[in-house]
Image (tube, grey):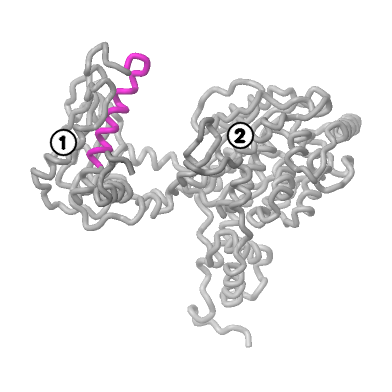
Amino acid sequence: MNAHAFEAESRAALYDAIASRRDIRRGFTMDPIEDAALARILAAAHQAPSVGLSQPWDFLLIRDVEQRQRIQVLAARQRDTFAASLPTGRTRLFDGIKVEAILATPLNIVVTCDPTRGGPYTLGRHADPRMAPFSAALAVQNLWLAARAEGIGVGWVSFFDPDELARELNLPAYLDVVAYLCVGHVEAFPTSPELALSGWARKRPLAWAVHDGTFGDRRLPGGNPVSLLTETVEAITPASTEAMAAAEERQSMLTKPRGSLGPLEDLGTRLCGMYGECPPPLPEPVAIAVFAGDHGVYAQGVSLFPQEVTIQMVGNFLAGGAVINAFGRQVGAEVVVVDIGVAGEVPAAPGLMARKVAAGTADMTKGPAMTPAQVQAAIEVGIDVARDLVAQGNRLLVTGDMGIANTTASAALISVFTGLDVAEVTGRGTGIDDAMLAHKVSVIETAIRINAASPQDPVAALAGVGGFEHAGMVGFLLAAAALRTPVILDGVIACSAALVAKAISPDAADYWVAGHRSVEPGASAALAHLDLVPLVNLQMRLGEGSGAALAVPLVQASARILREVATFDSAGVSNKE
């Protein structure tokens, strides 16, 4: 320990304040805050670092009840607007979350920012004016930590239209509101963040956030370099046999004949194994991740549709006008679109995750579709997408896809990993005729031969004849398994990616549910190899995640059986002799 470090007791107290700071919304008391304590808290906030020592913050103390009532009305309006935008799975969670304590605390503090303070020559602000509000945010953090040290709770309210709030506060036009804080004594500090306790979100581990030298090279100080794929695979464990045994026992006690609900009973048991508890949590919120990418093999004439349909459909997804959007709304799921390899620039939009590895793959009949670096990057994109969606609180994930010519790459992967002839697993995709189908089979056979694709080296086979969306889904499926989160597989594209993922980590398949049986022949071949029985068979072949989305209510119903159906004893119903 160096000579400038705090004594051990002081260090421990500082880290304790950081670890136990909470965004408080419940359990405030109206006991007044002592002036001396409030002064110490504000002094700590005022000692925050700031760009060019500009100290752009001010602290407006709000005590007047009538004014706070008006402010609460503003927050309630924005809360209702936000609630109306949520998928139904999120709405049920949000209904139980308190978002503000404006009238439940004796004091509200508004932290403002003057972005011009310090003058035109403020050191460090010239290139990036955002440094002013960033500095004010540091003052907020200092205030928060000092309040925790004093045993005083703070809750940050962000459900405001900034212009409405500024008018109500009668602020000068040159000031911006950085934070609206509810401050008061509390009955107790929660053991974990309230949003984590409610299931709205999860805390991200530190190891996900530390990059050494290069973004993506994740390791903690002193740790050995390890690929994100290796780290993810090492975290995968089989489904819990103990939880499944408990589920089987419970199934026999429920007020129904054993086996009368068919595959739903088996699925409920599997969910217990996935989550590691019986009964299982309700699988919601739900997120559908649509991985989009283009394929160089399109140049070989394997699709009826022009390649630009990929980017056009991505725009349709983001506008909410595709089938998967309609189905997502029906089942209460969020739809996110991952641009992992679209051959064109997708404009920024809500719901878009811009993670492009390259603008489409290479032509796999001429060599590998992806370089080793590209396939690794695409797998890591999928891992990060799954991690992000799970950290956001989603308890059920769904695969989706978009990419003209992606059934060609899918058939190639399925042939490689099942050992079946290409002709047995290749379908008509977007509706090609017999002549084009024969040509498609020939193209796939050439690609497999040129790249010497083999299931013994699954990542190399994926790079040789797969697509960016396939690689992304491989990472997605592996990361979900590592996080003990079920994934519903869609059609032939998802199933082909699942074959690769299972070859990398056989235990990962414990966490996947077959959503539907696509009419593409490769889908049935892949499902048989994965030993998965689909929940839905509606002769569908659209993709996008559409078939898997329709299976969401069935997965949720299987959990409700174990969660909500009474036992013979509790219902007073006689069991069989």
- Whether label 1 touches label 2, CB < 8 Å: no
Vertical comparison of 25 with 352: above or below: below
| Mark pair 1, 2: CA separation | 54 Å
What secondary structure is marked by label 1? Answer: helix
Closest to the observer, 81 or 189: 189
Q: Read off the residue under disc 2.
A: 322
**Residue drawn 63% across the image and 33% down it:** 377
Membership of 300 in magenta stretch: no
The outermost residue toward the bottom is: 577
Q: Read off the residue under disc 1.
A: 43
Residue 29 in picture, x, y percent from top left: 17, 54
Residue 345 in picture, x, y percent from top left: 59, 21
What secondary structure is marked by label 2? Answer: loop
Range of residues picked out in magenta:
125-144
Membership of 133 in magenta stretch: yes
The outermost residue toward the front is: 3
Q: Main secondary structure of the magenta part?
A: helix
Report if residue 25 is visible in the image: no
> Mark 2 belongs to which amino acid?
Ala
**Residue drawn 73% across the image and 51% down it:** 537
Q: Quadrant of residue 35?
A: top left
> Residue 432 shows which numbered tag?
none
Give the foreground label among 1 and 2. Answer: 1
